[in-house]
Image (cartoon, grey):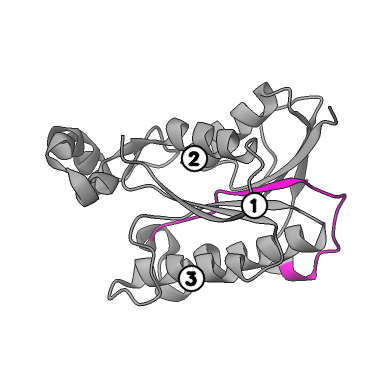
Amino acid sequence: MKARRAWIAGATGVVGAYCLDALLADPVYGDVQAFTRRPLSRTDARLTTNVIDFDGLASLPAPQPVDDAYCCLGTTMKQAGSRAAFERVDYEYVRAYADLAARSGASQFLLVSAVGADTRSSIYYSQVKGRAEEAVQAMPFRTVHLFRPSLLMGPRPEQRRGESISKAIAPLFAPLLLGPLARYRPVHACDVALRMIAVAKQDQSGRHVHYFTE
């Protein structure tokens, strides 16, 4: 069987780092292209790191073809510093990366979004996530998978005090989140990454939304 080709953006993030490790551990993928702002410490014979300026994504020529494009881009309002900066990463970069993948012939696009993503939401964060989802779904991919985790568990490069407190408390309340509320349970970033790759290998078609209810 012909080896698949994967792209990944956001490989230094909490989900992206696990996703990159899993891609390189999976024999299904013979070539992995990572798009990053800085060089990765990880090396592998199948890995090519493309250090780019994400502000120039829209003008990049299409690289070599790709089968599955993984998008783990994302920041927080606190990290970004302003609404405009947050939207640049979580919407504009996502849209530009998806466009580049579409121009390179990607058949599948897999996006880490967030629970509550909705353009009609009263919450700005959720609005932006919803707009990113809509932009990706409008592109000519055979398959789009939208992953909507709630609070992500796992190590992060930077310490977020409020989030650390939430992570400590959330597992205590998780069993109380039943029925439709189960999608708001915390989920480990590694589980999200592994689910993304498992779903990609199912080779489905159409648009699919994934919640983490277990």
SS for dot 1: loop
Residue 109 position within the rendered picture, expressed as x and y whole percent measured from the top left: 64, 53
What main secondary structure does the magenta stretch of the protein show? loop
Q: How many C-alpha atoms fall within 10 Å of the one at disc 3: few (<14), some, or many (≥20)?
A: many
Say above or below: 75 vs 28.
Answer: below
Label 2 vs label 1, nearer the camera: 1
Residue 66 is situated, as x and y percent measured from the top left of the image, at 79, 47
Quick one: 132 or 67, which is closer to the camera?
67
Q: Which residue is mark 2?
A: 15
Question: Which residue lies at the image location 71% right of the left edge and 66% below the top edge?
Answer: 140
Q: How many marks?
A: 3
Which quarter of the figure has residue 58?
bottom right
Q: Along the polypeptide, which appears first: circle 2 or circle 3?
A: 2
Q: Would you say 71 lies left or right of 31 here?
A: left
Closest to the observer, 139 or 164 = 139
- The residue lying at 31 percent from left, 34 percent from top is 214
**Nearer mark to the viewer, of 2 and 3:** 2
What is the spatial separation of the Cα atoms under label 2 and label 3, in whole angstroms?
A: 19 Å
Q: Which residue is tagged 1?
A: 205
The image's mark for residue 104 is none
Spatial separation of the CA atoms under disc 3 and disc 1: 29 Å
Q: Are marks 3 and 1 in contact (CB under 8 Å)?
A: no
Look at the image and give the residue range highlighted in magenta: 58-76
Q: Amino acid at mark 1?
A: Ser
Q: Is residue 70 magenta?
A: yes
Q: Answer yes or no: do the residues labelled 2 and 3 have beta carbons within 8 Å?
A: no
Report how far apart the C-alphas of labels 2 and 1 lie in the structure: 24 Å
Circle 2: element type: helix
Q: Which residue is mark 3?
A: 87
Whether residue 67 can be seen here: yes
